[in-house]
Image: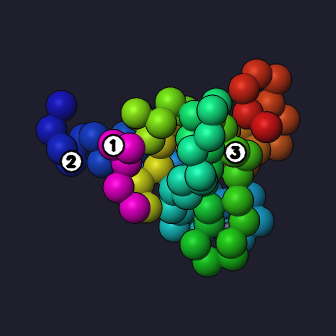
Amino acid sequence: MTEEQINEAWAEFKKPCPFCGSKELTGLLGVPDIEGTPVNVMCIPCGAIGPWVYIPTSQADKYGKGEIPSEAMQCWNKRAYGRPSDDYCW
Ligand SMILES: [Zn+2]
């Protein structure tokens, strides 16, 4: 897979904001605690945020500012489609 293909796949993976329709999304990392690091997705234009999900802190450390962990993206996508989570998103 070329980098371009990866970027395309990633763009496809991101669902637009359910409130304003934007795909300008950024990742937020919370304060790590005993359960790991909470991460979520925020819509840059309107500030809507997706559900927080914990990922291991060792994994969270690999993400730079604004990068979106895939777990958080999955939770965001569920919310964007109006399907409340039945598993780990909260
Ligand atoms: Zn929005």
Name the kind of residue labelled 2 in the image.
Answer: Glu
Residue 40 left/right relative to 61: right
- Magenta run includes residue 58: no
The residue at which mark 3 appears reads as 52
Q: Which of marks 1 and 2 is nearer the N terminus?
A: 2
Residue 56 left/right relative to 72: left
Choose mark 2 or mark 3, whichever is in front.
3
Is 31 in front, or is 71? 31
For the point 69% across and 45% down, the residue is 52
Q: Distance between the residues labelled 3 and 1?
A: 18 Å
Q: Position of residue 38 (x, y in %)?
A: 62, 44
The residue at which mark 1 appears reads as 62
Q: Which secondary structure dominates the residues rendered in magenta?
A: loop
Choose mark 1 or mark 2, whichever is in front.
1
Numbered label attached to residue 7: none
Q: Which residue in the rendered view is the most extreme toward the left?
A: 2
Which stretch did the figure color magenta?
Answer: 61-65
Report if the beta carbon of the residue with label 2 is closer than 8 angstroms to ligand 1: no
